[in-house]
Amino acid sequence: MASAAPVSNPTAPNSNNNKPSKNSNVNSNTSSNNSNHSIHSSNSTHSNEPSSATPTLKVMRLQSPSLHSRHNNNSSTVLGGSSMLHSALLLPDSFGVIHVGETFRAYLGALNTSEEEDVTQLSVKAALQTPTTRHLLPSKLDVEDQLLEIAPGKHLSAIVLKTLEEVGAHVLRVEVKYGNEKSIRKYYRFNVSSPLSIRELTVRGGTDKCFVSIAIENVTATSPLIIDKANFIPPMGLIATRISIGSSNNSNSSIESNTSTAVQRYDASGHLPPKAMFRYLFQVRNPNNSNTKGIAHKDELGKAVFSWKKTMGETGQLASMSVKCPPSFPYTNINPNFIIHGSGISLDVARDASYSTDSNPSNTKSLSNILPITVEPINPPQHLILAQPQTLTLLITNHSKKSKNLQLQFRMHFMSGAVICGPSFLNLGVLKENASKQMNVRIVALVAGLFKCQGCFVVDLDSGLEVPMMSLFQLFVYKHSDDYALNANNDKALENVIKV
C-alpha cells in the first residue's frame, strides 16, 4: 500500500497585502529560490489564438506508510492510536524523511477545473536539483512536438522517479506550460539524510593484501533497518573476500539448520535498530603478487556497498568512500622495531619514487629519500636449527634516480642469535636506477630462541652514503632437529582441534 505525500503549493507573495494567496492560479511575476513558490508567467495573446483554461498542478511524493509506534500515538488519525499502520489512511502534509540511496517517486497531476474551456498546448517538465547537479526527470507529460489537451473536469498524471545519491538540500522543480506560452513553475524543497554512518579501518596484511574493517551505525531516530547485503567492490585486478564467523562467507546465507540458536538466527537477519552498529571484515588481495607487484600505499582498494530495507519494504543502497591502502609506517624515520618481510615497504618506496620529481630532491619526508635503496628477503626461513647454516635470498632495489655502486654489509655488532656464515661484506656492483638484483647469503644460528635478522646496511661506494635497513625478518632457533619436529607435530594437532 502506498500513500502520497502532498506538498503545500504556496504562491508568490501578493504585492497588496504581502500574504501568500490561497488561490494557486493567481498570476505572479515574482520568483524565489529559497521557498516553495509557484511562478506564473504569461505573454500577451493574439485575438485569433484560442483561449486555454488554467490547469491546477498537484505534486505528491509516493511513499509507503510507516509502522505505528507505541511511543507516538496520534489520536487524530482515522483509526486512532490502536492502528498498527500509523496514519495509513491519511495523507501526510510533507515529503517526510528521505534517505540517500532510496528511490524518490513523485506524482505529477495536471487538472482542468474549468467547466467550459479546455487546457490546450500542455506540457509538464520536472527536474531534481541536488547539491551539485540538476537531473531531468522524464515523464509522459514531458512532450515537445505533440502538446497535450485536457477536457473540462478531466486530468492527466504521471510518475517521475530518481535514485538519491547525495546528502543535503534537494529541490524538485516542476514547470507547466499551456496556452500561448503561459507557464506555472513550482519548487519543492526537501532534505536528504544518510541512514547509516560508515567508518573504516584498514590494516596492511603483507605485500599483497589488506584487511578492511567497516563499521556501520543506524543513525536514524526511529527507523530500524534490515541490512540485506554487505559487499566490498574492489577495482579491476583485486579480489575482495568477506571474513565472517563460520565456514560461509555469504552475507545473504540463511540459517535453516535445526541446530541454529535464536541468537544465530537474529544475527543472520541483519536487523539493525536505531543507534545499533554492525562491523564487517573484508580481505582485499592481489592474486598476481610478486616481489615487484602487490598493493602499495595509496592504492585504491575499493568501496563497501550496503543494501538495506525499511519496515515496509522500501529499499536503498549506500556506499562508503573509496578505501586506500595505508602506509607501511609513518614517513618520519627508521623504526628499529619494524620488520621488512611482509610489510610491503618496498612497494611503498617504489610508488613514492615514481611520483617524486627532480624539482624537489631534498624532501626529507619522502619515503624514497629515507630509503633510496631497499633490501627485502625472499621467502626467508621461519625456523633454524642451531649451528646448521641455511641459504637466504635477498632482493636489493635501487629506487633513486641515479646509478649507484653498492656494497651489502652485515655488521656483526648489530646482529644477535643468527649471524652471517661467510663473507659479511658483498660487492653488488653498479645498480642502475629502478633496477633490482638478487644476492644469496648464508646465515647460521648461534643461540636458541626468537631473534630478528638485523644489522644490514647498504653503502654507496662512490658517495659514501650509508642506508641502514630495519630488521629483515624474524626467526625461531631450535637446539635440535627433534625439537623442531615435535613443535611441528604440536602445531598440526592444534590446527586439527581448531577445525573441529
Image: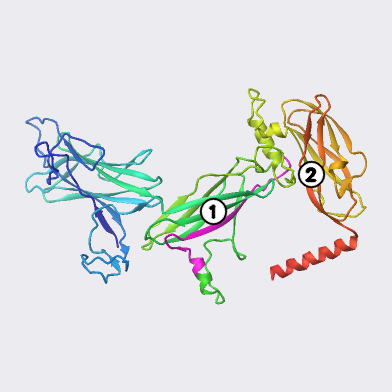
**For the residue labelled by badge 1, is the local secondary structure a helix, a strand or a loop?**
strand
Rate crowding at label 2 as few (under 14), some (14 to 19) or many (20 or more) other CA atoms within 10 Å: many
What residue is rendered at 72% in x and 44% in y? 290
Q: Which residue is mark 1?
A: 214
Query: Magenta stretch: residue 466 in it?
Result: no
Classify the position of the C terminus by image quarter: bottom right
Report the side of 470 relative to 114 (left or right). Answer: right
Q: Position of residue 397 (x, y in %)?
A: 76, 35
Q: Which mark is residue 83?
A: none
What residue is rendered at 50% in x and 45% in y? 321
What residue is rendered at 78% in x and 64% in y? 491
| First-in-chain label (2 vs 1) | 1
| Nearer to the camera, 50 or 357 | 357
Which of the 4 image quarters holds residue 411?
Answer: top right
For the residue marked with disc 2, what is the amino acid?
Answer: Pro
Q: Which residue is mark 2?
A: 377
Q: Position of residue 440 (x, y in %)?
A: 86, 41
Q: Position of residue 144 (x, y in %)?
A: 25, 37
Spatial separation of the CA atoms under disc 2 and disc 1: 32 Å
Q: Which residues are magenta?
A: 266-292
For the residue marked with disc 1, what is the amino acid?
Answer: Ile
